[in-house]
Amino acid sequence: MTTVGILGGGQLARMLALAGLPLGLKFLVLDPSAESCAGQCAPLQVGGFDDEAALAEFASKVDVVTFDFENVPASSAQWLAERVPVYPNPRALGVAQDRLSEKTLFRELGIPVPAFATIDSREDLDVALVEIGTPCILKTRRFGYDGKGQFRIKSPADAQAAWDALGAQASTVGLILEGFVAFDREVSVVAVRGRDGEFKAFPLTQNWHVDGVLSASLAPAQASPAVQAQAIDYARRVAEAIDYVGVFALELFCQGETLLANEMAPRVHNSGHWTIEGAEVSQFEAHLRAVLGLPLGALAMRGHACMLNWLGEMPDADGVLSQPGGHWHDYGKSPRAGRKVGHATLRADTPQALSSVVAAAGEALSRQAQVQPVVAVLSGV
Ligand code: AMP
């Protein structure tokens, strides 16, 4: 029996384990917290990602290693890779951990990106503010996620406040200033590349964020075939350039027919959760197939799907379970403000049918504001 080791024990590891059991796989999850929600579905080893003894024990028990969490120290990923196959490879992980290196790679590959500049000092910020202009966003280069480690600068007068908020991190995780993109839509490509280089992508997903955190996704995105093809081609270029193996997401801003790359996530991604019920092979199964060198199969969609994220605490499940095509995912986490505790997927055969079940679920859960942008797009189809 093959044992897949997963670094990080959050909901992504949990859903990987749930997808892998029918394939006859065993799992071992390494996480510093004994409360990790993946531990409810798979054996959990409690240990630090930088603890060599813990890593050695973990490596001795698994056949292949992958990630639920991209901020595992690159040195730990490298240490493991010298002992056991690690996918994605540590170099790919390293590129995706740093907003500067990923944006530099995108640009080298001919993929448009927002204007950006490295910020090492307060003076750099003043220079970059003139170059890039406002509005713009100051972000930490590393360890930022879900809108954390970001400060929006509306006018040059906000520069000091931005520096007060993040300046201390310039010498630790590094900072980057990015031009603010007045996008029409945000989309993501969730794609997979096999060990043999075979590449496949799910249909483009449209995403809505609130305070930098994903709130809702719709697949397929309402985008022209040219935009779909362009986005998927960008994802392929990135994957090939870093010899990526497994599932990853490329997040893009869409302005008319132009796409600008925001970032890549070197793992299964929240904007791909709809694939569990909405695609022939889910992103979780696709990732496992890729890292194990199994055939990837077809990623074809089943109709249309909408995913709604639950943050803080779980709403009442009945509002979704009572809808045709309504599916519920409770990650088994204790409630905490802003925490991703679960999601729902609504699936239907047509955009019209999806629009009515999404609206009905929003009504039943008093989440009208969350579903409104999805319903608006679907009713325009
Ligand atoms: P990130 O952590 O970089 O994915 O940012 C989280 C969210 O903040 C994105 O999904 C966007 O909604 C918004 N955002 C981040 N960077 C930019 C940007 N340069 N221009 C406009 N919106 C942005």
Image (cartoon, rainbow, N blue to C red):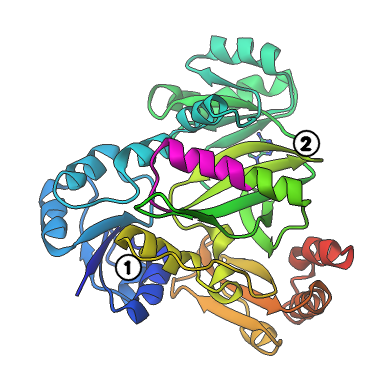
Query: Which residue is pictured at 74% across the width and 64% down the height?
Result: 370
Query: Which residue is pictured at 80% across the width and 44% down the height?
Result: 184
Q: What secondary structure is found at the residue carrying circle 2?
A: loop
| Label 1: few (<14), some (14–19) or many (≥20) C-alpha neighbours in 10 Å | some
Residue holding disc 1: 35
- Residue range in magenta is 232-246
- Where the N terminus falls, by quadrant? bottom left
Query: For this rendering, which residue is in front, 124 or 284?
Result: 284
Residue holding disc 2: 182
Q: Can residue 10 be seen in this snapshot?
A: no
| Residue 220: in magenta span | no
Question: In the picture provided, is 339 more to the left or to the right than 373?
Answer: left
Q: Position of residue 173 (x, y in %)?
A: 41, 30
Q: Can residue 364 be seen in this snapshot?
A: yes
The total of numbered circles placed on residues is 2
Q: Position of residue 62 (x, y in %)?
A: 18, 63
Q: Position of residue 194 (x, y in %)?
A: 39, 55
- Where the C terminus falls, by quadrant? bottom right
Q: What secondary structure is found at the residue carrying circle 1?
A: loop
Q: CA distance from mark 1 to mark 2?
A: 40 Å
Vertical position of residue 49 compared to residue 374: above or below: above
- Chief secondary structure of the magenta portion: helix
Query: Which residue is pictured at 25% across the width and 44% down the height?
Result: 77
| Residue 239: in magenta span | yes
Who comes first in sequence, dot 1 or dot 2? 1
Q: Is the shortest distance between ligand 1 and the CB of mark 2 under 8 Å? A: yes
Vertical position of residue 127 compared to residue 53: above or below: above
Foreground label between 1 and 2: 2
Question: In the picture provided, is 270 more to the left or to the right than 59?
Answer: right
Vertical position of residue 371 compared to residue 72: above or below: below
